[in-house]
Image (cartoon, helix red, strand yellow):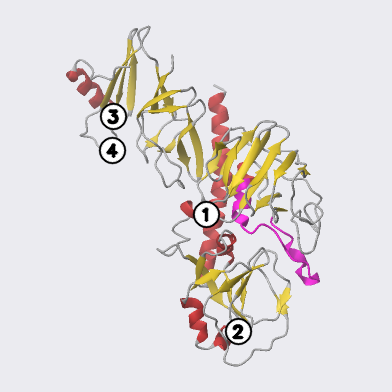
Amino acid sequence: MIEIVDAGPFNTIQDLGRPGYRNIGVTASGAMDPLALKIANLLVGNDEGDAAIEVQTFPFRLRFREATVFAVTGGGDATLDGVALPPWWMQTAGAGQCLELRPSPSARAYIAFGGGVDVPPVMGSRSTSLRGAFGGIDGRFLKKDDTLRLGEPAGTLPVDGLGAVPPAKALAAFFPNAPDGTLLIRALPAGEHDLFGADAERFWSQSWKISSQSDRTGYRLSGEPVRAPASVEMRSYGIVPGVVQVPPGGEPIVQMSDANTAGGYPKIAGVVEADLWRLGQARIGSRLRFVRSSHAEARTLDRALADYVEDVRNTSQMVARALKTIAGR
Amino acid sequence: MSAVDFSDPATIAFLAAALQAAGVDGIEIEQPARKVRIVVERDAPGAAPLVQTLQTSPGATQLEAVTAPMAGIFDANHPDSPAPSSEPPREVGAGETLGFIRVGSVLLPVKASRPGMLTGRVAKDGAVVGYGDPLFEIELRP
């Protein structure tokens, strides 16, 4: 059992979401940085898709009611009873210890616990749908004095302190940033791209600022507007995270984890899935540029991510077994 | 603590050459009153070996080596840490993380087992180390 000691709004329970119900209008939800969620779970010996806490409003504090294996990944500067933890780190907390997360350059932190957060699954997922008001704890964000039950730890690693090399470092060759720190986001031109005529080029060439009207539903970008020469009338179509739409104002919207299931604005591009975790960690006010990608590159990035996840899964278990053997001598 | 050159340079040279020929990184020889440690620079064959004589006679300050918990690549800093950790000598607490061993994409902490004064770093950042290899030296508080 854990107890929320201090929490701002919009911190929720998330897993990998419920993607199979968009046809009946149910938003998929799920972690904004699914990679960080998976690694946090693997570090505590869970299945990669178990439910964890997504923290996007800092500071955030919780107390452990009993000895608990936990991991913090993604953003957030974590301390356990005031002692700093390295980033992307697993540790065992004692009963009564307090975990505090303060803001870091990355937008969202994930806290996984051995056994996962035990809330009732809704349509196959424990993810909180804030707009649908279901999932997680009664479909709402976590607040002070909430208590969370944890599941039975399955294969908890018998080590005290273990981390993953953060993906931004381990996969630096696959996920570059511009020298000035602008996030480079790979995307493919989408259905209505060519209707924007000459303006379409400016969509790719300029750097966009993530505006304050950005949340788990989508990021509104600000910059020099891109407009189609003639107005584009469309029927509604299905939407998934990563779809970049351009409303009449000309400033694009990138759909994120709580994306609507359908929409009618013309879509200029689609962010490749392998770059969505980086978008999920981009902070309001930061800048990004879209880089024209290819299906082949998108597949290469998918494989690089999958290899990294597999390496963390296999190596953490191998290391834990070796340490157990050494300790038993 | 006294870290002085071993008394007979010829003996050291002979031992160092033997270690290098055998592909061994280092050796510790314990005698009743002292301990001699020779660490060979594997990547720089011509370089002089690191030689330390550690006095262990009663009354002297006790030195403890912090060793690698596992084979891997040593680094005193976390890959995400922009600032290098402060160099020795400095006070360290029991359980304090002094560095990391990287195995693939996984990091293991190197921790001080007891409080004391961190007096030396034996392994260099990026060095491949084996289980039990000395990484740091701590002068234990009496």
- The span from disc 4 to disc 3 (Cα, nearest Å) is 9 Å
Structural crowding at the residue carrying mark 1, measured as other residues with C-alpha within 10 Å and reported as few (<14), some (14–19) or many (≥20) = few
Q: Which of the two discs, 2 and 1, sits closer to the camera?
A: 1
What type is the residue that disc 2 sits on? Answer: Glu
Question: Quadrant location of the N terminus of chain A?
Answer: top right
Residue occupied by mark 3: B40
Residue A4 in picture, x, y percent from top left:
72, 43
Chain that bears disc 1: A
Up the image or down, A96 lies above or below A236; here it is above
Structural crowding at the residue carrying mark 2, measured as other residues with C-alpha within 10 Å and reported as few (<14), some (14–19) or many (≥20) = some
- The span from disc 2 to disc 1 (Cα, nearest Å) is 34 Å
Report if the CB atoms under discs 1 and 4 are less than 8 Å apart.
no
Residue occupied by mark 2: A192
Residue A92 in picture, x, y percent from top left:
63, 34
Residue occupied by mark 1: A105
Report if the CB atoms under discs 4 and 3 are less than 8 Å apart.
no
Which is more toward the observer, A107 or A236?
A107
Q: Residue at x 54, y 21 (%)?
A: A329
Q: Residue at x 79, y 51 (%)?
A: A137
Up the image or down, A196 lies above or below A92; here it is below
